[in-house]
Amino acid sequence: MKRAALGVAGCVLAGAVLAPYGVMLLTALKPDAELRTTPPRLLPLSWRPGNFLEVLADPGFSDWLRVSLVVAAALGIVNVLMILVAVAVYLRTVQWREAEA
């Protein structure tokens, strides 16, 4: 019973994490006119997979992608450096305590 509950909890958590991506995908497949309807609808009335081709054909897309990748890489490097500093401080503290003992 406990194992089944954990499986259900994992599925619920996965659904909660993935739901925003599903909403983004469904929104990306809508035509412009459907984006501003009231009340909003989750599923598009008419599907527009060509929206993705329009974005890829946009001349500014490569610049936007490059900037996003540079920012993501820079943040990744900063995070790794911060973790390395924290690990170095921890290891130095442990070695200092062992030397005193």
Image (tube, grey):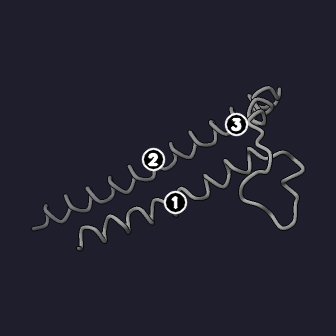
Nearer-N-terminus badge (2/1): 1
The crowd level at tag 2 (other Cα within 10 Å; few <14, some 14-19, many 20+) is few
Q: Residue at x 38, y 63 (%)?
A: 10
* Disc 1 and disc 3 in contact, CB within 8 angstroms: no
Residue position for label 2 = 81
Q: What is the number of the mark on residue 17?
A: 1
Q: Nearer the viewer, mark 3 or mark 2?
A: 3
Tell me the CA gap for discs 2 and 1. Answer: 28 Å
Tell me the CA gap for discs 3 and 2. Answer: 21 Å
Q: Nearer the viewer, mark 2 or mark 1?
A: 1
Q: Amino acid at mark 1?
A: Val
> Residue 96, located in which quarter of the rendered image?
bottom left
Residue 74 vs residue 8, the one in the foreground: 8
Q: Is residue 81 left or right of residue 45?
A: left
Q: Residue at x 62, y 36 (%)?
A: 69
Up/down of 61 relative to 22, above or below? above
- Image quarter where the N terminus lies is bottom left
Tell me the CA gap for discs 1 and 3. Answer: 26 Å
Up/down of 59 relative to 91, above or below? above
* Disc 3 and disc 2 in contact, CB within 8 angstroms: no
Q: Residue at x 87, y 60 (%)?
A: 37
Q: Is residue 60 left or right of residue 25?
A: right
Nearer-N-terminus badge (1/3): 1
Nearer-N-terminus badge (3/2): 3
